Image: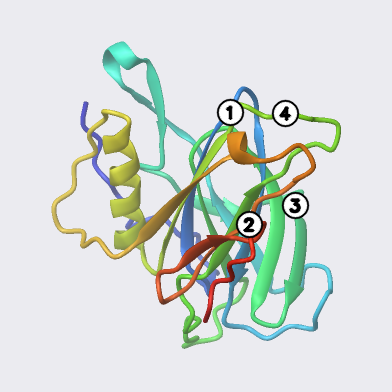
Amino acid sequence: MGAAMHYSQTFPQGYTVVSPICFVSCRSRGPCRVSLTFPHALDATPDTTTPSRLVILSSATAKVDAGSQGPFFSPSERVLDPLDDIDFKVDRGLARFQTELCHPSLFAVAVRDTPGSIPLPLRCCLYVLYPVIEPTVSMVTGFDVEAYVGMNIPTVATAVMSWAEQHDLKMEETHFVMSGEHVTVSADLLPPHQTDWDVSRRGDGKVCGTYTSNKCQA
């Protein structure tokens, strides 16, 4: 099965992306609630609700036939649209939100109007992701979250292709250059009292879990 990556019409008009673009895949028995933190290039008053200009863009789901393996929900041929009904907080340089996803999705922080040239964050590869576990759940199994982060569309497209290859699927593209990173978080590793898991990825490439004494250094 082959699926070409087409991103020329990805972003809606009237928006400028001011964060990295993240590809998130969650495999669980039901919908997966995830919390993500994105660096962004606009200053905002700490701990406020959604500023009028900042929004979260999320991809719609496209269904691709994977033959004998059944349908495959792919970011190929997707369009990023504003995401509604999210818990969205903005600090200086960081945008935090929770959302629910059932299929692999793309996320990015954008500004509503186009203010001209906006430099993307220097820490372009920083993100925090964790599965949100209900307090009443004492043991979680079969719950995996994969996240890929990229500065640009080609990077994200390559990450998506890597995800497809891991699942014995083929997504065809020739001119993208690999520069992204990915981590996998398994909730099987969570102790009963641990209700969230943070994985940080910074420009130096270090990955760590905040439940340990190890800390990712800037």
Image coords of residue 101 (percent x, y):
61, 38
At which x and y percent is residue 93?
A: 64, 80
Residue depicted at 21% across the width and 59% down the height: 176
The numbered mark at residue 111 is none
Q: Secondary structure at mark 1?
A: loop
Q: What residue would you read off at disc 3?
A: 86
Label 2 amino acid?
Asp
Mark 3 or 1, closer to the camera:
1
At label 3, counting other C-alpha atoms closer than 10 Å, the crowd grade (few under 14, some 14-19, many 20 or more) is: few
From the top left corner, tell me how far across and down residue 8 is, in percent.
32, 58
Q: Which mark is residue 28?
A: 1
Q: What crowding class fits label 4: few (fewer than 14 Cα within 10 Å), some (14-19), or many (20 or more)? A: few
Above or below, 64 relative to 148: above
Q: Which mark is residue 198?
A: 2
Nearest the camera: 188 or 143? 188
Q: Earlier in the sequence, mark 1 or mark 4?
A: 1
Gap between marks 4 and 3 measured at Cα:
26 Å
The quadrant in which the N terminus is found is top left
